[in-house]
Amino acid sequence: MKTVLITGASKGIGQQIAKQFAQKGYNVAINYNKSENQAKSLYNEITSLNTNAILVKADIKNLNEVQNMINEIISCFGHIDVLVNNAGISYKGLFIDENDKITKEIIDTNLLGAIYTSKYVLPYMLKNGTGKIINISSIWGNVGASLESTYSASKAGIIGLTKSLAKEYGYNNICVNCICPGLIDTDMNKNLSKTEIEEIIKQIPAKRIGKTEDISNLVLFLAECTGDYITGQVITVDGGFTL
Ligand code: NAP
């Protein structure tokens, strides 16, 4: 039985990814930080499918918590076959007005968090002789977003991390890929008004915003053997928004 660790699985895209891995019979490690109730109900839902799961609370920007989380998963399941670096936060505002604490929090969560988890999961993948890392970046990491400069920088960093790790560990049968979602219907966008969403939809050839399944389907594909010859890739899933 393969094991997957999904960071930020308590909500949104991460939650949907966890459900789909559970349906495929994976052991699912559900990481969360603040949303304990949502993470617990996901755990209950997944275990009711007779799938093994573990609930692991860890703030991914805290190295000790990341190490403890990985140790706990290894003690429980013995291996981690797939790592999905999904946890992330966003912030909108003028770059020059951005509070320094927020700037650091965005970089630490979105980039450093993925670096920590990858760094401490990779030795177990190397020991296993196989592994898949799937990073969730953003279209803004590719093309940049006005009013989201630090967020865009953190997501561009994820793209660099993906390509470098793919080159460094490709020889060890470890594939590292990256997904750049467009606008997806989750809490991350709950501050957008109906009118703002309608305006954005006018710019999307697919004529709708994305669903969490649009991302989780691709994550599953990249995690399975069908994705074995794909590595170091940055795949945009945005309904054509950034074409
Ligand atoms: P969401 O609904 O706000 O969920 C974010 C998740 O990240 C939550 O489960 C949250 O866990 C977790 N998280 C945040 N900080 C954390 C930390 N320090 N340690 C551990 N977990 C942490 O957002 P989403 O839309 O699903 O976003 C998922 C990923 O997709 C993010 O990386 C985001 O940047 C990316 N993305 C989203 C969109 C979009 O339009 N939604 C577009 C492009 C990219 P807790 O609540 O438990 O703290």
Image (cartoon, rainbow, N blue to C red):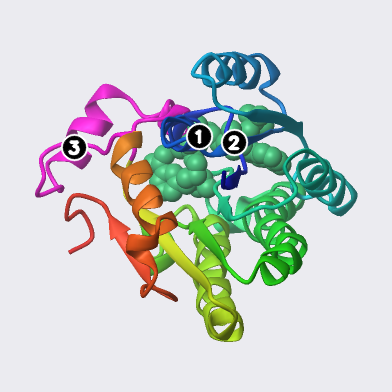
Picture residue at 42% right of the left edge, 26% below the top = 190
Give whichever of discs 1 and 2 has the lower sequence position: 1
Q: Position of residue 98 (x, y in %)?
A: 64, 51
Q: Which residue is mark 1?
A: 18
Q: Are marks 1 and 2 in contact (CB under 8 Å)?
A: yes
| Label 3 within 8 A of ligand 1 by Cβ | no
Picture residue at 59% right of the left edge, 77% below the top = 165
Amino acid at dot 3: Glu
Query: Which residue is more in the foreground, 188 or 37?
Result: 37
For the record, the magenta segment spans 184-211
Task: Kindly report which numbered mark, 1 or 3, lies closer to the viewer in this rendering.
Answer: 1
Q: Please state, as top left, top right, bottom left or bottom right, where the C terminus lies in the image.
A: bottom left
Q: Position of residue 224 (x, y in %)?
A: 40, 55
In the displayed orientation, state which residue is furthest to the front: 1
127 vs 145, left or right, is right
Task: Tell me the element at label 1.
Answer: helix
Q: Which residue is mark 3?
A: 199
Whole-angstrom CA distance, mark 1 to mark 2, is: 7 Å
Tag of residue 28: 2
Pointer 1 local density, CA inside 10 Å: few below 14, some 14–19, many at least 20 = many
Toward which corner of the image does residue 213 lie, by quadrant? top left
Whole-angstrom CA distance, mark 1 to mark 3, is: 31 Å
